[in-house]
Image (cartoon, rainbow, N blue to C red):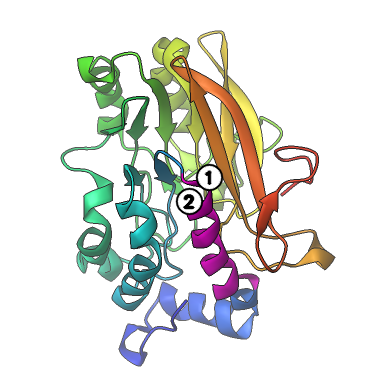
Amino acid sequence: MRPPTARQLLGKRLLGTANLYLGGRRSHFTRAAQEALVQAVEEQAPDAVVCTGDLTAQGTPEEFEAACGLLRPVFAARPSMVVPGNHDTYTGDAVASGALEHYFGEWLGQGSWPRLHLLGEDVAVVALQVCEPRMDSAGRVPQDQIDGLAAVFQDPSIGDRAVFVALHYPLRGRGGEPYGPRARALFGARELEAALGPHAGRLSAILHGHEHHGFRTSVSLGGVDVPILNPGAGGYAHLPHKRRTAHFTVYTVEAGGLAGVERFAFDGRCFEPEAGGAWATGG
């Protein structure tokens, strides 16, 4: 996390900087956790990597450069994909700068959203871009992306791969309720669920980020219960007094579907399998 320059301190970024550096939110994240995350992922040697956004705090070119320096070895070593987070599209100038595409373009994919990523022979990810510069923290699913889902799911290149949907915002809250409040909501979520319904039988899970304290829930799509999975923030500080720390998840895919989930937690030094199983200790 790098503080913005004086000329970058305008509008939302000024408020965000005050929250980070005066309000103390910066202490919730640590370079130690981020470096331990990279080491732990390399040790797990996954076949593919899915990143659901928030590579930066305020979307500055300097932050994107630093994030790429840290994460490029992980992404470049295997099939990987990224969707933007709301902090990556933090302001209009963050989007206009093109820094996200410059540093992470090879993992964002090409063409119109939704984008299809074929990660090796076993996994397909349908990626949605639901983040836009706003003064609040809400997201929105554009109608053209909802309309484009059917064609993506019918793409013959998917074959018999396990299919995941990846987006930054949750479709549902941790209790399965519509996600909110309004200032953090995902507008168009119900319409997205309706559009996913005909394809629910193909879906292994919906993967998201945004909420720093991970959780799992599910949503009924066309009569099929589809898991919604959020590992939590990968760079979060180890804060045992708040029962909060960094996490990442490892998904096992077999026979074209999701066969297992293991979540790893940062203990202040390294990442270890979560005691009691994935999400057993909460966020």
Question: Which residue is at a point 34% across and 70% down the rendered structure image?
Answer: 69
Main structural element of the magenta stretch: helix, strand or loop? Answer: helix
Disc sitting over residue 138 in the figure: 2
2 or 1: tag closer to the N-terminus: 2
Disc sitting over residue 185 in the figure: 1
Looking at the picture, how far across and down is residue 260, in whole percent?
A: 60, 27
The answer to the question of whether label 2 and label 1 lie on touching residues, with beta carbons closer than 8 A, is yes
Farthest residue, direction left: 111
User: 63 or 49: nearer the eye?
Assistant: 49
Looking at the picture, how far across and down is residue 7, in whole percent?
A: 31, 88
Please provide the residue range marked out in magenta.
28-45
Question: Which residue is at a point 58% across and 56% down the rendered structure image?
Answer: 233
For badge 2, the amino acid type reads: Ala
Farthest residue, direction bottom: 6
Name the image quarter holding residue 96.
Answer: bottom left
For badge 1, the amino acid type reads: Ala
**Residue 254 visible in rendering:** yes
- Does 229 sit above or below residue 44? above
Q: Is residue 33 magenta?
A: yes
- Residue 265 shown left or right of residue 155 in the figure: right
Q: Of helix, strand and loop, which one carries label 2?
A: loop
